[in-house]
Amino acid sequence: MSIQRLKTGLAVVLLTIACEARALAAGGEVVIGNLDDLSGVYSDDGGPGSVEAMNMAVADVGAMVLGRKVSTLVADHQNKPDIGASKFREWADQKGLSMMIVGANTGVSIAMSKIAAARKIPLIIIGAVGASLTNEDCTAYSVHYVVDTTALANGTASAVLKAGGKTWFYLMADYAFGAQLQSAAAKVVEAQGGKNLGAVRVPLSSPDFSSFLLQAQSSGAQVLGLANAGDDFTNSLKAAREFGLTRTMRPAALLVFINNIHSLGLETAQGLYLTTSWYWDLNDDTRAFARRFFGKMKTQPTMTQAGTYSATLTYLKAVKAAGTTDSDKVMAELRRAAIHDMFTRGGYIRADGVMIHDMYVMQVKSPAESKYPWDYYKVVSVMPGSEAFGPITGRCPLAPK
């Protein structure tokens, strides 16, 4: 048998497996996948907590929709785009995948968005924040649900500028997320009359920040812009404080989660400005969800964990409203319906795929201001979604400017 005939036969077998998996999904279970950093630098921001939030949402609908069982698949993408893309293809072709949730890492999410478009499977992006996901990397099947670099910069950079921080130097994670977050903040700084004095790329999970902090110190900038996240954020801020840098430079936390503040402690984190899409102590609905989550995880939920719960419910509601798991019909329903739940009131998915909702500029309380456990934030301002996420740029071909 020729090599070409072997290749053709293999292609037919793979296509048959994929068709059988999708046929099973069409009349069998509704399968929700969740790929996230479950063990690395971002695992506390989403990770196992996001998996639990997804499971809570599935349980809240009785693990059934349209008379069909809702089941879940979970794996660790290890912050590697090739692993994320490979697992997505595997679940799509062999497990009857109906919808995919992806947690942290912009690079992983970009790789997975290509699979979503090719396999025509809805992808809801939770923890990755790179705004390219709703610009040049947008697809008809991806939704950017929780936050992006545009909203983070519009909130935090503006707040620090108003507080007097006019000159900036950045430590940025050395991949797509860090570059996009630094670029977004730099644009806000320039637009509001500040100056960007430099930036240095820092490898993911760096064990030593001293050389990078020396570069920041020598720049003479007033603000240390931290365009990183997770353990890298907490470790870089701790190192800056130990280095004495925070006595002469104001740290700007461009992406921070409540678990990071808990790890740092208020003595270290007090006064930080940050931007978040959700906070456990905002209102009765957020507190009710937080009580349930805390009972299971013994920690308050982050915005990505709350967003995972909301996104899972939003998808299942869309399936019910559409009367099918057909991806095109479900995506149409997702773009049509307003989102009202414990995460947002009146949120909606714009033509470029970003979910528009209010964002909150917060300042971390001092130890004296905090009155009870996890009482960490005070609201500085509420940014309407249109202000936070900005106008459609025209870089997404699905949504011309």
Image (cartoon, helix red, strand yellow):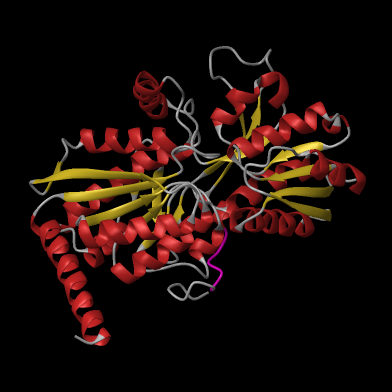
The answer to whether residue 115 shows anywhere in this view is yes
**Spot occupied by residue 127 in the image (x, y as percentages of width and height):** 48, 46
**Spot occupied by residue 217 in the image (x, y as percentages of width and height):** 88, 42
**Spot occupied by residue 193 in the image (x, y as percentages of width and height):** 83, 56
In the picture provided, is 292 more to the left or to the right than 234?
Answer: left
Q: Check the image and report above or below for 26 versus 309.
A: below
Tell me the quarter of the picture where residue 96 sits.
bottom left
Towards the viewer: 194 or 283: 194
Tell me the quarter of the picture where residue 234 sits.
top right
In the picture provided, is 219 more to the left or to the right than 322?
Answer: right
Q: How many labels, in total?
A: 0
The answer to whether residue 335 shows anywhere in this view is no
Towards the viewer: 247 or 207: 207
User: Residue at left 17%, top 72%?
Assistant: 13
User: Residue at left 54%, top 19%?
Assistant: 374
Towards the viewer: 129 or 283: 129
In the picture provided, is 132 more to the left or to the right than 253?
Answer: left
In the picture provided, is 24 more to the left or to the right than 102?
Answer: left
User: Residue at left 74%, top 38%?
Assistant: 208
Q: Give the range drawn in magenta.
A: 390-394
Q: Residue furthest front?
A: 1
Q: Is residue 203 highlighted in magenta?
A: no
**Spot occupied by residue 49 in the image (x, y as percentages of width and height):** 40, 32
Q: Main secondary structure of the magenta part?
A: loop
Towards the viewer: 183 or 33: 33
